Image (cartoon, rainbow, N blue to C red):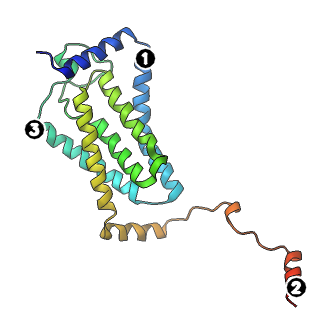
Amino acid sequence: MVTFFDGAAQALHGFAVTNPWLTPVVTWGTAGFLILCPVGFFLFWVWDRRLRPGVAGLLGLVLTQWASHEMGKLTYQPRPFVTLHFTPLFPHTPNNSFPSSLTAFAAVAAVIGVLAWGRRALVFVVGVVVVGFGCVYVGVHYPSDVVVGAALGTVCGGLTWLIAGGRPVARVLNAVERRLPKRRRSKASTPAEPRPRDSARVSTAAS
């Protein structure tokens, strides 16, 4: 019996086979967003010098990896290319498909990024969509794997964001931040010193 998710995966694979030019675009786009997550977090850290997003992100990845592993023990689902008997467009071992850990990792970055930097971090949300689509497109995940992975990453990211903002952890992070070199301010943001003529005029007017 072919389920809805089987049919969706099979239909998308058929589209991919008939449009081979799109495969490297999807593959490199997925890889690009996975690379964007740590690079983006580093650039945001250079911008605002806060440690909480980075610490929450690292804890979120660890928690998500553990949760994905435990969920995989409870539910085993063969990969689409195993069940539907086709060659995946990206080489992958025929292990458990559920849930999509890559989508979960991208969701961790998205939820922490939005909580930390607001609309400026919406690019990470786009990354979740791109990574999830890419995993289904190349035939290594079902849509259900992606949806559950995104939900799992969102929960883990939100939880570790709260942990990293708790009073004990926040005290340690604040102490470390005070020892870090401060971000240089631009000349435009610093008040200009009065020129000698201006100071002379002020002193004359005062007298």
Residue positioned 20% across, 19% down in the render: 6
Q: Quadrant of the N terminus?
A: top left
Upstream in the sequence, badge 2 or badge 1? Answer: 1
Between 28 and 22, the one nearer to me in the picture: 22
In the rendering, at what x and y percent does residue 119 appear?
A: 47, 47
Relative placement, left or right, of 102 versus 39 is: left
Mark 1 to mark 3 CA distance (whole Å): 35 Å
Element class at badge 1: helix
Residue position for label 3: 74
Q: Amino acid at mark 1?
A: Leu
Element class at badge 2: helix
In the rendering, at what x and y percent does residue 35 appear?
A: 43, 38
Residue position for label 1: 22
Mark 2 to mark 1 CA distance (whole Å): 74 Å
Relative placement, left or right, of 139 versus 205 is: left
Quadrant in the rendering for residue 137: top left
Mark on residue 192?
A: none
Quadrant in the rendering for residue 65: top left
Residue position for label 2: 205
Q: Quadrant of the C terminus?
A: bottom right
Mark 3 to mark 2 CA distance (whole Å): 83 Å
